[in-house]
Amino acid sequence: MAFVPTERLHLGAEAEVWAGTWMGQDAVRKLRRPRKWRHPDLDHRLGHRRMMSESRLLIRLKRCGVRVPAILDLDPENGRMILERMPGLPLIEVLRDPTQSTEFISTVLHNTGALIRRLHREAITHGDLSTNNILVDEYGTASLIDFGLAAVDYEVERFGIDLHVIDEILGASHPEHEGAIDTLLDGYTAEETLLGAPPEQSGGAVPTAGEVLKRLDDVRSRVRYHG
Ligand SMILES: Nc1ncnc2c1ncn2[C@@H]1O[C@H](COP(=O)(O)OP(=O)(O)OP(=O)(O)O)[C@@H](O)[C@H]1O
Ligand SMILES: [Mg+2]
């Protein structure tokens, strides 16, 4: 195998991720971990399907110029993926780092919002927009990873939910960055202003930034009302 591991980056319930090199290039190896409580056949089938869906969407997004890792190798049978290593640290760590300037944090949040809009314009929702799945480099440039729960969609609901997930996380885990979500949403809207209305996709019209923000408000009041 051409992957040479150097350090383990992550050991979670679903995946083990190692940094290393692939044919001399910085790469990561993502290995799906079996869910012991699930029947092995079902677990294998679900894992296989998720990895295929994740790869398909990554290829599509890379082609559209959205900052996501390239797929270098894929072995869905063994639950193994080799991905381009994206530079930087998870957003959660950047937000927790007290040495970062307010200006830098603003830039990062704005760029993150713009990147999420770029994703949504391709009719793709992420499904797990936590601050662990957004990586930020030293220039404040953001990339998105972990597309295991992502999906192609045209209904505004899942787009609104994507923003609601990051909204809740910013509010709950990073209350010291007051107004963080507003800066992110400014970036989301600014990207649409920059690029114009989203192009029609093969499956239909993609919700506009305005429609998604309106849905975010609906989701917020639903959550407030029902707890
Ligand atoms: N392409 C990549 N470049 C750099 N770091 C990565 C890359 N992919 C994953 N990582 C690192 O590994 C961590 C876990 O990867 P990922 O989010 O894809 O797994 P996961 O599905 O969330 O795993 P689990 O659900 O078990 O927590 C990320 O938060 C990130 O720190
Ligand atoms: Mg993750």
Image: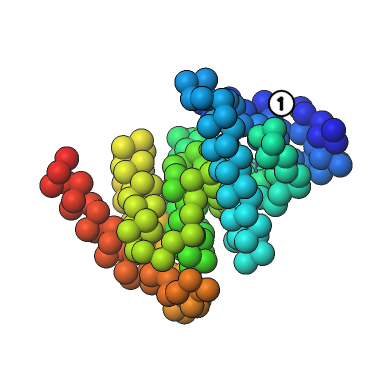
Q: Is residue 146 visible?
A: no
Percent position (x, y) of residue 208?
A: 38, 72
Percent position (x, y) of residue 188?
A: 42, 63
Relative side of 138 to 200, left or right:
right
From what the image shows, is residue 43 above or below residue 133?
above
Percent position (x, y) of residue 43?
A: 54, 30
| Callout count | 1
Residue at point 44% right, 61% down? Answer: 153
Residue at point 49% right, 50% down? Answer: 150
From what the image shows, is residue 76 above or below residue 108?
above
The quadrant of the rendering that contains the C terminus is top left
Relative side of 137 to 223, left or right:
right
Percent position (x, y) of residue 114?
A: 48, 62
Rendering colour mode = rainbow
Relative side of 99 to 9, left or right:
left
Q: Nearer the viewer, residue 151 or 39?
A: 39
Q: Nearer the viewer, residue 209 or 140?
A: 209
Residue at point 33% right, 70% down? Answer: 210
Q: Is residue 109 visible?
A: yes
The quadrant of the rendering that contains the N terminus is top right
From what the image shows, is residue 208 above or below residue 220?
below
- Quadrant of res 17: top right
Q: Nearer the viewer, residue 137 or 116?
A: 116
- Disc 1 marks a residue whose amino acid type is Glu
Which residue sits furthest left? 225
- For label 1, the residue is 7
